[in-house]
Every structure is written in C-alpha cells, then in structure tokens.
Image (spheres, rainbow, N blue to C red):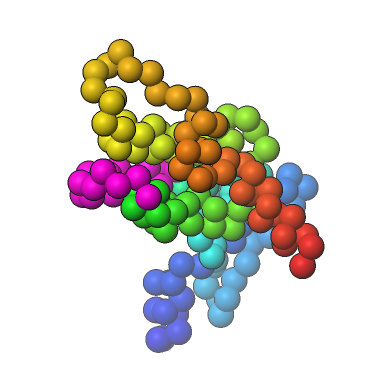
Amino acid sequence: MVLKLLLTNALLYTLHIGNKNPNHIYNLHQIHIPNIPKGEFVRDLGVYFTADLKWKAHINIIVTKARRIMFTLLRSLKSKNANFLINTYKTYVIPILEFACQVFNPYYAKDIDLIEKVQRDFVRMVYKRTTHRFNNLTDIVPPYTELLATFGLELLELRRLKCCLNLFHQ
C-alpha cells in the first residue's frame, strides 16, 4: 500500500511532554507512530524539544552552529574593516542565536553564558584583527562591555529580553 510506505518513511514521532502524561500509543491507518525516548529530542519548526522541556540540547546545537559559521566567516573573510565584520556577524550569526528565542529563552546562568560566549569570542577576535597596535601577546583586550560599545552591539541576553517584551506587547 502506498500510504503505508509513505507513513513508514515519514518522520512521524510522538513526544509525550510532562511526567504525568499517560504515554498512549498512537496509530495512523494501523501503523504505529513511535515515541521519542526519554532524554532524546525532536526538532519541530527549527526548535529542539525534549519531553521535560529543558533547552540544553537546543542551546548546544545553536551555539555549535553559530560558532561554526562565526569561524568560517573569520577564516574566509580577510578584511580588517571592523564594520564589515560586525555586519556579517549580525547577518549570519545573530539570527541563529536568536531564532525563536521567545520559546527557549534560557534562564540558567550557564546557558546564558554559553550563548553570550559566542559573541564575546567574536568581538575579541575582531578587536585583535582590526587594532593595529595589538601586536604582541602582552597587549590587553578591553572588557567585553567596552568592546560591545565600541562595535555598537548589545548583550544577547538584552536582545532576547527585547524580543520577548515585543512579543508580549503584540
């Protein structure tokens, strides 16, 4: 049967959220829809969900992806123009870190720091690349907040808060 073949190849899963969920078994046209095991995650509309609604998996995935793109940009773009590098960062990296932030907005300090570390590393690398007086290892990089002001960026935590407040206002 064609429908059976299509359903067996489709990515249909059941995600039971919560501890008191009865974990029913669901079927579609007599085909069993498998459950997502505890601790595993499923991607839906670009957001990675787990049964306990912890966002560690999602945050690790977006941070890894953002860091990969950040290092690719820095490796492939040999420019020493800070505005150009910051604009490419805003175009390619920040959307990955902020996509659906109203859903997963982290509340643990370690998750907030993990996301913020992407931007912290980027602005430090841009500063080192674009500052001509930064020649040896003894030169000191300014604090993160000062680098943000220099490059016209905001804390990612503040940007997420603004996104959440904007959604709440709408």
Locate residue 80, reporting x and y percent.
26, 43
In the rendered image, the quadrant that contains the N terminus is: bottom left
Left or right: residue 4 versus residue 168 is left
Query: Residue sitting at 59 percent across and 58 percent down?
Result: 100
Q: Decide which of 140, 48 is in the foreground and name it.
A: 140
Query: Residue sitting at 46 percent across and 48 percent down?
Result: 62
- Decide whether residue 79 is among the magenta residues: yes
Magenta part of the chain: 63-83
Q: Is residue 160 above or below residue 4?
A: above
Locate residue 35, reporting x and y percent.
56, 56
- Overall secondary structure of the magenta section: helix
- Decide whether residue 101 is among the magenta residues: no
Q: Is residue 139 above or below residue 14?
A: above
Q: Decide which of 40, 65 is in the foreground and name it.
A: 65
Disc tally is 0
Locate residue 119, reporting x and y percent.
46, 39
Quadrant housing residue 71? top left
In the rendered image, the quadrant that contains the C terminus is: bottom right
Q: Decide which of 146, 15 is in the foreground and name it.
A: 146
* Residue 119 in view of the camera: yes
